[in-house]
Each structure stands twice: as C-alpha cells, then as structure tokens.
Amino acid sequence: MLTFQTFSLGALQTNAYLVTDAERTGAVVIDPGTADPALLRRLEAFELKAILLTHAHFDHIGGVEKLRERFGCPVYLHSAEKDWLGDAAKNGSLHWPEATPPITGNPPDRLLLDGDELQLLGETFRVLHTPGHSPGSVGFLCGDLLFAGDALFRRSVGRTDLPGGSSDQLTKSIREKLYVLPEDVIVLPGHGPDTTIGEERRENPFVRA
Ligand SMILES: [Zn+2]
Ligand SMILES: [Zn+2]
C-alpha cells in the first residue's frame, strides 16, 4: 500500500508527487518541477529509488538534476523524449523566460515504452503511453492510482498546441488508454486537483467516453 504527498511547484504550479512505500523507507518522485526545499527536506527521510517523468516539459523537470545528483537515483522518461532533458528548445524552457531559466540536463537513465512494468517500492508501476500533449507523455498506473501527467485533468485535458502535440492523438490516448481503466481509479494530474476515471468519463467536456 503506497501513500503519496503532493507538492505544487513553480510558476505553473506543477504537481510533483512524493510516493512512499508502506514501511516508509523507500520513495519515488514523479515530476519534480523544481528542487523545492520542502520536497528535499521531506526526501531526506527516505531512500529515493527513482525519478519518474510523465513527460519532459520544463515545468515537470526543473528539479531533476539536483535530485539526481543529491540522491543518485535513476531518471525514467519515455523514449520519444529521450533528448529533451538536454535541449532547452525541446523542453520549452528556452521560450518561457518569465517562468524558468533554460534547462539543459543529462539524458534519462532508463527509457520507457508503452506497457513497461516498473517494480518499485514493492509495487508495479505500469507505463501507459498517452501521446497528444507531447509525443512521449505517459501515465504511471499503480494499483488504483494513475499519475496522469498533462494528458487528463479534472474536467479538462492537456493543451495540444506545443511542438509535437496533437489533439486527435490526445483524444485517442484518453479514450483508449485511460477511459478503459476501472471507474474508481484516482487520476493524479500534472496540474490541479485529482479526479477519478469514472467522473471524467461522465463529466469531461473535452473528451467524451
Ligand atoms: Zn506539459
Ligand atoms: Zn505541465
């Protein structure tokens, strides 16, 4: 049984999730948008096993290098964005000077593909490739928790006007990869409050079930 804590970080209030195991010894961080001092302090109590990235837009990766250096843990990212951590144009940080300095980090340590099953914290994190917001967007499904990145939000969906985005692809990803999950799966998005698959199937105005 995992527990998680949410940290909304940076200019775009991106949700970083600190996921910890039942014994509260190991941890995984999803989308550290900044090296937030409160998150770092919290992490000192755990062994950080991995940094999982739902995609490599700047608002999700600003804390990656500092955490990787400090805790020596591997960074996981979908192969379609394998060169984005080191490329400030691709990760968008070059174009948003009011929000972030340019971000150029090292490449990911592990590349993800659809259907991968990551064994972390004594649980299985299943990788669901959900392109559309960005080409390498993934969700991580662990039990009844879905860390959804910027694909699906409460009553909204991710923007598709950034490089590599596609609204047709996003709609298909949401219908075929997310709406097929059990109704009671809790959706933990990259921005804003959580929701459930059932609620979004019924209420989401942008992608109908
Ligand atoms: Zn994004
Ligand atoms: Zn985002």
Image (cartoon, rainbow, N blue to C red):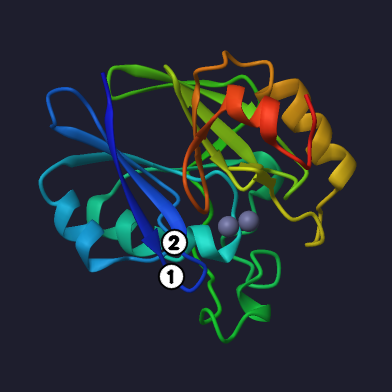
Q: Is residue 129 visible?
A: no
Q: Position of residue 194 (x, y in %)?
A: 47, 40
Q: Give the residue at x 50% y 45%.
A: 53
**Mark 1 residue element:** loop
- Looking at the image, residue 119 sits to the left or right of residue 18; the answer is right
Q: Give the residue at x 24% y 57%.
A: 39
Q: Position of residue 203 (x, y in %)?
A: 68, 33
Q: Give the residue at x 80% y 30%.
A: 208
Which of the labelled discs sits on residue 33, or is there none? 2
Rendering quarter of residue 148: top right
Instruction: Pick whichever, 94 or 108, lies toward us.
Output: 94
Q: Give the residue at x 28% y 17%.
A: 122
- Looking at the image, residue 108 sits to the left or right of residue 157; the answer is left
Give the position of the C terminus as an image quadrant.
top right
Disc 2 packing (10 Å; few <14; some 14–19; many ≥20): many
Question: Pointers 1 and 2 in contact (CB under 8 A)?
Answer: yes
- Looking at the image, residue 46 sits to the left or right of residue 74; the answer is left
Q: CA distance from mark 1 to mark 2?
A: 6 Å
Task: Please say if 114 is above or below 74.
Answer: above
Instruction: Pick whichever, 88 or 38, lies toward us.
Output: 38
Task: Classify mark 2 as within 8 Å of ligand 2 or not, answering yes or no.
Answer: yes
Quadrant for ligand 1 reads: bottom right
Rendering quarter of residue 170: top right
Name the amino acid type tagged 2.
Gly
Task: Please say if 31 is above or below 195.
Answer: below
Q: Which residue is mark 1?
A: 10
Instruction: Pick whichever, 132 or 199, lies toward us.
Output: 199
